[in-house]
Amino acid sequence: MTFAGAPLPSATVDCWEDTRGEPQWQARVLTRTGPMAESGELSGRLADGRVLSGPALVADQQVGPGSRRETLVVFHGSGALRGL
């Protein structure tokens, strides 16, 4: 997975339609380094080999406790993900 060109570990992605019927999606990544940009292109490869991508915003970042300092980064995108 990459965000704004920066590599990130694997992510969990959820897709849904809002009350207007518009596609929305969210991706969550647990990483030791947060993204450098606030918005950019999120892309990655699914287990079945398909490549997904779409414009995303960093919606939330939560730094965990302890020496590992892992950060949960939540991305939000509007519109259909390309590749689905």
Image (tube, grey):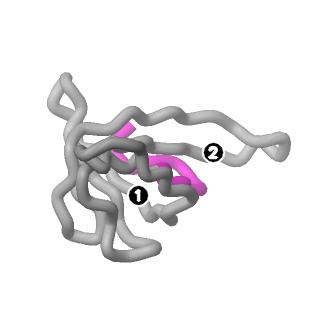
**Could you tell me residue 31's position as x and y percent?**
27, 48
Residue 62 is left or right of residue 18, and the answer is left
Task: Kindly indicate the quadrant of the structure image that contains residue 66.
Answer: top left
**Could you tell me residue 20's position as x and y percent?**
83, 46
Please state which amino acid type lies under the numbered disc 2.
Answer: Pro
Work out which quarter of the rendered image holds the C terminus and state it. Answer: top left
Residue 28 is left or right of residue 47, and the answer is right
**Disc 2 packing (10 Å; few <14; some 14–19; many ≥20):** some
**Could you tell me residue 73's position as x and y percent?**
43, 51
- Residue at the spot of label 1: 54
Residue 59 lies, with reference to residue 39, above or below; the image says above
- Residue at the spot of label 2: 23
- The residue most toward the front is 66
Please state which amino acid type lies under the numbered disc 1.
Answer: Gly
Magenta part of the protein: which range?
74-84
Give the residue at x 40% y 43%: 65
User: In this orientation, which residue lies closer to the viewer: 75 or 80?
Assistant: 75
Give the residue at x 44% y 48%: 81
Task: Kindly indicate the quadrant of the structure image that contains residue 11.
Answer: top left
Residue 75 is left or right of residue 34, and the answer is right
Give the residue at x 57% y 59%: 59
